[in-house]
Image (cartoon, helix red, strand yellow):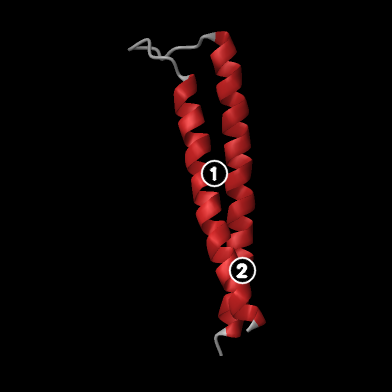
Amino acid sequence: RRKPRNIFDVFNFLISIIFLLLIAGMSFSQGIELLHSNRVSGNLNIPVYPFFFVLALGCVAMALELLKDLITGIKGIVK
């Protein structure tokens, strides 16, 4: 009875991991670009690039957490 739900969960985790890794990659490349251009915020003159790196790191951390859940879900289907 739990198997259809596990299949849906695995599919959902997989899509979420792909989406988060795409965001992480794009954020990292944007951060590199902003690092080389020395871009700063308008009002406070704070460098913008660290925020993109933090965003990329957070997305990778969430993707790793979802990968753990994905493995758990696959084990539930195989059982």
Q: Residue furthest left?
A: 44
Residue 63 in the image: x percent, y percent? 55, 51
Give the residue at mark 2: 10
Residue 76 in the image: x percent, y percent? 59, 79
Residue 77 in the image: x percent, y percent? 63, 79
Query: In screen coordinates, is 11 left or right of 54?
Result: right
- Seen from the viewer's position, the closer of residues 17 and 65 is 65
Give the residue at mark 1: 60
Question: Judging from the image, what secondary structure is the residue with disc 1 in?
Answer: helix
Position of residue 10 relative to residue 77, above or below, is: above
Q: Do the residues labelled 1 and 2 touch (CB within 8 Å)?
A: no
- Three-letter residue code for mark 1: Val
Q: Can residue 23 be seen in this view?
A: yes
Query: In screen coordinates, is 60 left or right of 11?
Result: left
Disc 2: CA contacts within 10 A as few (<14), some (14-19) or many (>=20): many
Disc 1: CA contacts within 10 A as few (<14), some (14-19) or many (>=20): some
Q: In which quarter of the image is the C terminus?
A: bottom right
Residue 27 in the image: x percent, y percent? 57, 32
Cα separation between marks 1 and 2 = 18 Å
Question: Nearer the observer, disc 1 or disc 2?
Answer: 1
Position of residue 12 relative to residue 8, above or below, is: above
Report the residue at 44% width, 12% height from top.
40
